[in-house]
């Protein structure tokens, strides 16, 4: 549920032009057989096609948990995101930015809790299955990130500019290409790993550049 967003300063309430905020927790759905244009994403029977479209429909101000439930299958369509340092378009499956999150783990990307190999987010270039910038509360769990390219180094999950990202029970697979990262946190961001993490066929594993990461009850 989303409504227009307001700031309250003392007794004065100011509308934020063009912004909306959540007024309760909700779940939206995506499927490799869904549609971003014909469906509303509100039920498993009417799912969106892309993870990116699900994220784009989340209100600017996220005061409650919003879960994107992914149906089984391979997600290999997304959008180009602009690298904030190089102003270069990158082919990514899901770019998460420009959201104001009230608490950690508010934006949840949920795969299959019984079989994390049943949901695969496939990418084919430097950036990435998930590119998270500045958002402080992204939680990705129970899925596989895998590259389908053998001609370029890849980063499955890229965290940038003070993003806070938690991965739980996720497989990161780069198909053995030299220079690939499973997860990379930089520029003041934080990457947390928990649960059953599989980091396979990746030369550099998890990287941290002017950032932080932690392992909480993690098995590899």
Image (tube, grey):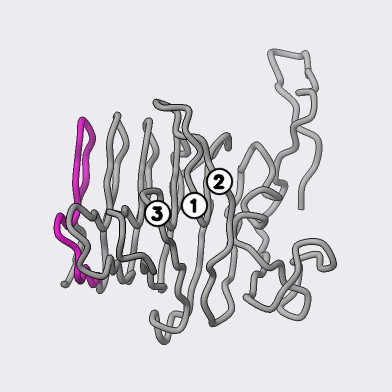
Q: Nearer the viewer, residue 17 or 103?
A: 17
Q: Is 8 situated left or right of 62 in this image? A: right
Q: Position of residue 63 (x, y in %)?
A: 61, 43
Mark linked to residue 92: 1
Is residue 129 placed above or below 212 in the rendered structure?
below
Q: Nearer the viewer, residue 6 or 206?
A: 206
Residue 132 magenta = no
Secondary structure found at label 1 = strand
Q: Is 131 situated left or right of 64 in this image? A: left
Mark linked to residue 125: 3
Residue at position x 37%, y 32% in the image? 162
Residues packed near mark 1 inside 10 Å, few (<14), some (14 to 19) or many (20 plus): many
Instruction: Tell me which label, 3 or 1, sits earlier in the chain.
Output: 1
Q: Do tag 2 and tag 1 residues touch (Cβ < 8 Å)?
A: yes
Q: Which residues are magenta?
A: 197-214
Is residue 35 placed above or below 10 in the rendered structure?
below
């Amino acid at each position: 549920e989303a409504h227009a967003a307001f700031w309250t300063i003392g007794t004065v309430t100011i509308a934020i032009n063009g912004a909306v905020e959540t007024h309760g927790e909700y779940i939206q759905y995506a499927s490799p057989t869904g549609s971003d244009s014909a469906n509303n994403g509100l039920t498993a029977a009417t799912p969106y096609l892309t993870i990116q479209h699900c994220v784009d429909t989340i209100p600017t101000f996220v005061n409650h948990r919003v879960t994107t439930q992914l149906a089984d299958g391979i997600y290999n369509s997304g959008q180009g995101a602009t690298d904030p340092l190089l102003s270069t378009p990158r082919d990514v499956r899901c770019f998460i930015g420009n959201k104001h999150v009230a608490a950690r783990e508010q934006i949840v990307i949920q795969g299959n809790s019984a079989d994390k190999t049943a949901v695969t987010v496939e990418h084919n270039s430097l950036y990435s299955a998930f590119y998270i910038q500045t958002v402080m509360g992204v939680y990705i769990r129970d899925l596989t990130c895998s590259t389908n390219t053998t001609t370029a180094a890849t980063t499955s999950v890229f965290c940038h500019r003070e993003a806070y990202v938690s991965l739980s029970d996720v497989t990161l697979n780069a198909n053995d290409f030299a220079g690939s990262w499973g997860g990379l946190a930089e520029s003041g961001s934080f990457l947390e790993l928990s649960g059953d993490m599989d980091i396979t066929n990746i030369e550099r594993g998890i990287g941290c550049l002017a950032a932080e990461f932690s392992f909480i009850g993690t098995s590899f």
